[in-house]
Image (cartoon, rainbow, N blue to C red):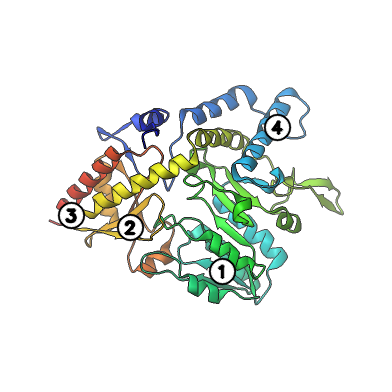
Amino acid sequence: MAHYDIQRIRNDFPILAATIYDKPLIYLDNGATTQKPQSVIDAISQYYSTLNSNVHRGVHYLSQRATDAFEASRKKLQVFLNSLHDHEIIFTRGTTESINLVAACYGKAFVNAGDEIIISALEHHSNMVPWQMLCEDIGATLKIIPITDAGELDMDAFRLLLNDRVKLVAVAYISNSLGTINPVREIIKLAHGYDIPVLLDAAQAVQHVPIDVQELDVDFLAFSGHKMYGPTGIGVLYGKEKWLNKMPPYQGGGEMIKRVTFEKTTYNELPFKFEAGTPNIEGVICLSAAVDYLNDIGLANIYTYEHELLEYATNALLDIPELRLVGTATEKSSVISFLIGNVHPYDVGVILDKLGIAVRTGHHCTEPLMDRLCIPGTVRASLALYTTVDDIDTLVEGIKKAASMLLA
């Protein structure tokens, strides 16, 4: 992309100039967490230097300024996702808490013994275990959308799972292990044909593709700040107003109340009903800086650049005779999982680390998926908006060296 200034972008990330074991850092673990641009780092420093105060209810100057910045971030997320109302944006600790919130609160309001929840075989544990816990607690049944050997959802099987007993469908927008981009629009349309709401785990999507929740018509959407170049410990749950109003609170305490007596508590209105206690104020305010950064580059530009890089990387890796790609879906995001012969992924990852190349190894919190594929795990290289062709070339040479050592 002639207009994609990769060097300018890389200059925005101080850590990318680091050396590891006297080698330039090649950071390819973006699926686990992304690095932070200087604008986000500066926002964190500025918050603690100029704004630090508790939000809401405070009458003093700092509290009012912090509250204004906090709520301005909520409105920015509303625009970022194109939600209908800003009170449909709930701040959480991350994707995991967002999904647990829906499992607990939607589950309490709408799921009964004998009902069914549908997830897919691609899910991260955070979009699996909360639904298992819910089903075990109330006697509901968890149904699984199977996948093909390429790592794509079996949509014919999904259609057969839909019935009047299903109370929710919860699937990843993009697989964290394989990079598969699921047909979420079709999933939502099919589920809504049975009046079944849909939750999308967008932890691996929101930093790669533009998301419009009204266009998707999704009911719930969850993601984390630290995977989209923002701070750790902050996440977002989008929920349609009609569902959030009918759901009970997730936690009790300050902020989520309107009036408290020993006899009765009246809950607050949205979004505060789901934001008990002092929130991660710094995380919320500085997530706004990450949104600004993504908007400045443009998610459509990011998607195009990363897609071109994915094609380049895939072709380069396929030239390594001992390498086997895991996950070959037609529609993929910038994740490449692979194995080298019969070598354990950990061993490959250790050698790459000594060469300054950061990748992720293991089952990537998708253990049932690895069982389905009959493998212990993979080596995963996950690309980002600052990844370069040179990074890919260095990875390829590193894998060749690892293969020569481990297969000798």
The answer to whether residue 62 is above or below residue 25 is above
Identify the residue shown where x is 38% and y is 31%: 5
Viewer-proximal residue among 363 and 290? 290
Q: Tell me the mark number nearer the camera, choosing from 3 and 4.
A: 4
Viewer-proximal residue among 120 and 45? 120
Q: Mark 4 falls on what kind of element?
A: helix
The amino acid type of the residue labelled 1 equals Ile
Label 2, label 1: how many angstroms apart (C-alpha)? 26 Å
Disc on res. 406: 3
Q: Tell me the mark number nearer the camera, choosing from 2 and 1.
A: 1
Q: Which residue is mark 1?
A: 118
Q: Mark 1 falls on what kind of element?
A: strand
Q: First in sequence, mark 2 or 3: give its number.
A: 2
Please identify the residue farthest to the left as the structure is shown. 408
Q: Tell me the mark number nearer the camera, choosing from 1 and 4.
A: 1
Q: Mark 3 falls on what kind of element?
A: helix
Identify the residue shown where x is 59% and y is 59%: 199
Kindly check if marks 3 and 4 are in contact, taking CB atoms under 8 A apart as contact: no
The amino acid type of the residue labelled 3 equals Leu
Q: Mark 2 falls on what kind of element?
A: strand
Q: Which residue is mark 4?
A: 67
Disc on res. 265: none
The amino acid type of the residue labelled 4 equals Thr
Q: Tell me the mark number nearer the camera, choosing from 1 and 3.
A: 1
Label 2, label 3: how many angstroms apart (C-alpha)? 15 Å
Q: First in sequence, mark 2 or 4: give its number.
A: 4
The quadrant in which residue 389 appears is: top left
Q: Is residue 161 left or right of residue 378?
A: right
Label 3, label 4: how many angstroms apart (C-alpha)? 56 Å
Label 2, label 4: how many angstroms apart (C-alpha)? 44 Å
Q: Which residue is mark 2?
A: 378
- Where is residue 127 shown, x and y percent of the image? 53, 60
